[in-house]
Amino acid sequence: MLFRREVREARFLSPLQGFAPVVQRVEFRRDPLTGRWSRINLERARRVRQAVGGHPSGLLEESRRGCFFCPENLDRSTPKLPPEFGEERMRRGEAVLFPNLFPFAEFHAVVVLSREHLLPLREFHPGRLGEAVGLSLEYFRRVRGLDPSVGYGMLNWNHLPPAAASIVHPHFQLLMDRTPTFWLEETLRAGRDYRRRRGRNFWLELLREERERGERWIGEGEEVCWLAPFAPQGQNEVWAVFREASCFGEVGEEGVRELAEGLSRVLRGYEELGVETFNLTSFSGPEDGSGRRYHRLSLRVISRPSLRPLYTSDSGFMERFQYEPVVETLPEELAGKLRRVFGG
Ligand SMILES: [Zn+2]
C-alpha cells in the first residue's frame, strides 16, 4: 500500500528570529484510497492567533434557558415521527429520537444524548453513547422497513457551535438517503477500483498494514479498529473501522458496544488534549450489503476550534473550495497520545 508523502520547503527571513533565514517544512500527504491530498505544517500550530479571549462558559450556560432539547421542553418543542413509525418519539435510556425540524434529507432525525444540557467530553461514557448508537441503528432499520430503496444511513454529530451545532445540548443527527453523498460515492468508487485492480478489499489491507506499521494504530477490539489516518482531512482525525460490517445494518450488539467504548475513549483523550468541540460522521456502504467485497463501515472524528468569543475557524479557502485541507496535527503523534487512553 502506497503512503505517498512529499516534503517541500518554504524559505523566508523570520521576524521571530531577527530576520534570519528560516526553512519551514510542509508535508504533502496523499490518501492511499481516494488520492485526496492534505498538507501538514506543525509550525502553524504555534502561530499567533488574534482571535483569543476568555472561555465563554457563561454563554453556554445561558443557552440552557428555553433549550428545546432539555427534558422539561422536549415533549412540547420537538417534532413527532409520522404514524407509520408506530411511536411518536423513540427512546432508549436517556436517548430520545425525533425528526429534525429543518431537515435536509427525506429521513433526517435528531437523537438527544442526555438529559443534561451540557456535558464535559469525559462524561460521554460508553453506556450513554451505546444507547444513542443503538437507537440510531434501530431508526435506520425502521426506515428501511418502511422503504427498502432508502439505502444509505449516516450518523453525525456536530458538538458545540464552533463545530456548526446550532443547539448546544448534545445530539446526533441521522440521515437516510436514496443516494450516497459525494464523498461517500467517491470512497465507494475508489474501493471498487482497488478491488478490481488488486483483487483485495482496501479496508482489510489498510487494517493489516496499519496494524503492522503501528505508528498510527490506536487500538482494536473484536469488531472495531481505531487509527489515525495517514492523510487527515481535519485536526486530530481518528477513524473507527469495522472489520466485518460494511454498513450499519450489519452491526450487531457487540459492534455497538465496542464503538461506544472506543468513542468514549477518544473523547476522553480529546479532553486531555484540550479539545472542546468536534465533528463526527460515518461512511456506511449500501444497506443491501452489496459493498462487502470492497467497502467497510467507518466513523470519523475531527476536532474543531475551541469555544472563544472570537475564534479562528479552521475551515478556510483550502478546506471549503480546494478540498485540500491544512492540518496542524501529526497523525503519528496523535496516535501515540490516544494509545495511552486505549491502554496500549
Ligand atoms: Zn438543553
Image (cartoon, grey):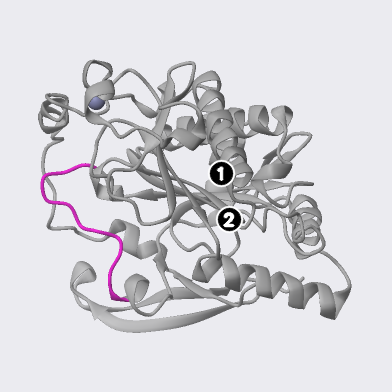
Residue 71 sits in quarter? top left
Part of the protein shown in magenta: 307-317
Considering depth in this image, is 213 or 286 the residue closer to the camera? Answer: 286
> Is residue 5 toward the left or the right of residue 17 in the image?
right
Q: Residues within 10 Å of mark 1 (few under 14, many from 20)?
A: some
Q: Residues within 10 Å of mark 2 (few under 14, many from 20)?
A: many
**Residue 308 belongs to magenta span:** yes
Residue 78 placed where, x, y %? 27, 31
Residue 151 placed where, x, y %? 62, 56
Q: Where in the image, quadrant-wise, is ligand 1 located?
A: top left
Q: Are marks 2 and 1 in contact (CB under 8 Å)?
A: yes
Q: Is residue 36 visible?
A: yes
Q: What's the magenta bit mostly, secondary-structure-wise?
A: loop
Asked if 249 appears above or below 326 in the picture, the reply is: above
Residue 126 sits in quarter? top right
Q: Secondary structure at mark 1?
A: helix
> Is residue 5 toward the left or the right of residue 303 in the image?
right
Determine which residue is flagged by label 1: 143
- Measure the C-alpha gap from mark 2 to mark 1: 7 Å
Considering depth in this image, is 149 or 26 the residue closer to the camera? Answer: 149
Q: Is residue 305 visible?
A: no
Determine which residue is flagged by label 2: 150
Residue at screen point 25% across, 48% down = 162
Residue at screen point 33% across, 18% down = 115
Query: Residue lying farthest right?
Result: 199
What is the quadrant of the N terminus in the image? bottom right
